[in-house]
Image (cartoon, grey):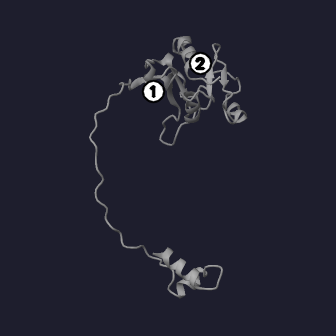
Amino acid sequence: MDFARIVERGLGQDHDILPRVDQAKQSGGFQDTHAPFEHLSARDRVNQLTNRIVRDRNFRKNVLRAYGERCAITGLRLINGGGRAEAEAAHIRPVEHNGPDIVSNGLALSGTAHWMFDRGLVGLAEDLTILVSRQSNDMDAVKGLINGSGKLCVPERPANRPRPEFLTWHRENCFKH
């Protein structure tokens, strides 16, 4: 409605610009209120049955506890205002590829580090050196996120550290060399 008035006013006059807002209001040109709302019909709903792998509810808790709620790549330990750790529990070998919900298949990662790990932009060497993919579009920024040692921050307890077979699977199937 307003568009039609703008076109009508603009094409019907010799001026090469639209009138100022205050001039338009004085002449009754622009409408400041909403047009009447037309109620839309209800959206269709689809009933569906899904099939997904059941995950262990304790995986997150156990992984974060093992890593001291600290991101294993950045080294940051961020706790939100509600007292909840911002680190996430990431699978090294994902559940959808038959990765188990055990601490040695998990890493505590910040949201950004988790995203990069899942997409193969960062990976881990056998000695737990953090690898950065050549396909990263901002290599310096990614390297800047990595903790100063350049190696994964690992749990104290050796049994909770990443198992070599899961790291190998990630390097061979996810990491973009």
Q: Is residue 155 visible?
A: no
Res. 120 image quadrant:
top right
Quarter that holds the C terminus: top right
Q: Earlier in the sequence, mark 1 or mark 2?
A: 1
Viewer-nearest of discs 1 and 2: 2
How many numbered callouts?
Answer: 2
**Type of the residue with mark 1:** Arg
Residue 43 in the image: state x and y as whole percent. 30, 53
Residue 162's disc number: none
Residue 35 in the image: state x and y as whole percent. 40, 73
Residue in the image at 33% along x and 67% along y: 38
Whether the residues at callouts 1 and 2 have beta carbons within 8 Å, the answer is no
- Secondary structure at badge 1 equals helix
Residue in the image at 59% along x and 25% along y: 72
Residue 7 in the image: state x and y as whole percent. 54, 77
Foreground: 101 or 94? 94
Q: In this view, does 125 lie above or below 17?
A: above
Residue 176 in the image: state x and y as whole percent. 62, 25
- Secondary structure at badge 2 equals helix
Mark 1 to mark 2 CA distance (whole Å):
23 Å
Left or right for 151, reference 49: right
**Type of the residue with mark 2:** Arg
Q: Mark 1 points at which residue?
A: 60
Q: Is residue 9 visible?
A: yes
Quarter that holds the N terminus: bottom left
Residue in the image at 51% along x and 43% along y: 81
Q: Mark 2 points at which residue?
A: 171
Residue in the image at 31% along x and 61% along y: 40
Q: Is residue 5 above or below residue 59?
A: below
Foreground: 44 or 103? 44
Res. 130 image quadrant:
top right
